[in-house]
Image (cartoon, grey):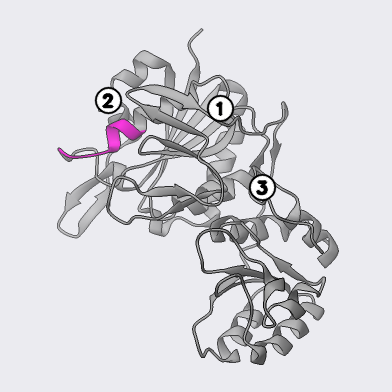
Amino acid sequence: MRKRILFIATGGTIASEVTAGGLKPGLSAEALLRAVPAIRELCEVESLQLYDLDSTDIGPDHWLGMARAIRENYARFDGFVLSHGTDTMAYSAAALSYLIQGSVKPIILTGAQKPMGFDTTDSRVNLLDSFICACGADMHGVMIVFNGRVILGTRARKTHSKSFDAFSSINFPHIADLRDGHLTQYIVPQFAWEPSFYDNLDTRVSLLKLLPGADCSQLEFLLGRSRALLIESFGVGGLPHGMHRAVLAAARAGKLIVMSTQVQNEGSDLAVYGTGRPLSEDPLILEAYDMTTEAAVTKLMWLLPLAGNQAEAARLFYAPVNRDILTAGRK
């Protein structure tokens, strides 16, 4: 029996057209499907035009809208493909991984570096590959399909701004390859027969990227406006000694502080250096370890409405979701 797939369009480069003001989304979901007729030969497909946005304009309210659209149609379809702009696709994939947990049905995000109407475009291949993946027997949960790679939604990051090889899987292998229409799968994503859906995010989460010589003013400003702060430090992690007091005081006042690293691969280890060890020994300071920034930020947004205290927040943060964290539980 042919699978039934819902195609959800949100805009992005894949649907963009040339205008006097630059590339802007304009092609409908049905127009995208007509451009790749092999999709309808592969499966039964229906379309939903959810948004028509450049992904720079997509944020938490849109993530909730995507999750809601999938939840409302979950029983009627065998899988879901979402077209999305590449610039924030990794954030959306991570957010959906927390809003829809344990899905036995594939939820695939894809897009393109060049619009569908261009002669040299990756749109057709990426879109067809996504539907091939959505029809796969062992594809479960949220993932990104792009340039022949299948990447878990919590592990993706855009690492090239122009080339077709736009996304990488960070600190985790990509789970499958697609070549000439053939799917070769290496890892089966985790799933549950009954998924868990969530419908709330707390956006009072901030990100501080440390600069050499930074003082406490930015830190204090963000702490004053946020319930949770992710700090991207240097190397394996650490914090200038002049910031320790402010961070520890904020944690004791109820703020969630997560230490991470600006280095893309291999993750953090606060305990290595003297600038990080006092923080690693404090149970109120959390550490992202091998998580991506995209996953850590969206996971904080997801857990804040659920956690009644810092201990519960820490438990939720360190509990793996869609293999988002491998190195945890040291404290």
Q: Quadrant of residue 177?
A: top left
Task: Give the residue at x 54% y 44%.
Answer: 153
Magenta span contains residue 51 = no
Q: Position of residue 171 (x, y in %)?
A: 56, 51
- Mark linked to residue 150: none
Quadrant of image for the C terminus: bottom right
Mark 1 neighbour density, 10 Å: few (under 14) some (14–19) many (20 or more): many
Work out how far the residue at label 1 is from the one at label 3, CA to CA, in angstroms.
24 Å
Q: Say which residue label 1 marks.
A: 139
Calculate the distance from the C-alpha at mark 2 to the C-alpha at mark 3.
Answer: 33 Å
Q: Residue furthest top?
A: 1
Q: Is residue 122 magenta?
A: yes
Instruction: Point out the stretch of residues depicted in magenta.
Output: 119-126
The answer to whether residue 101 shows anywhere in this view is yes
Is residue 188 positioned above or below 60 on the image? Answer: above
Residue 200 horizontal/vertical position (percent): 67, 52
Determine whether, in the image, residue 135 is placed left or right of residue 187: left
Q: Residue at x 64, y 47 (%)?
A: 98
Q: Which residue is mark 2?
A: 34
Amino acid type for the residue under numbered disc 2: Arg
Residue 47 appears anywhere in the view: no
Determine whether, in the image, residue 298 is placed left or right of residue 264. Answer: right
- Badge 1 or badge 3: first in the primary sequence: 1
* Occupied quadrant, residue 188: top right
Of residues 154 and 277, the one drawn nearer to the viewer in this rendering: 277
The residue at 76%/82% (across/down) is 248
Residue with the mark numbered 3: 199
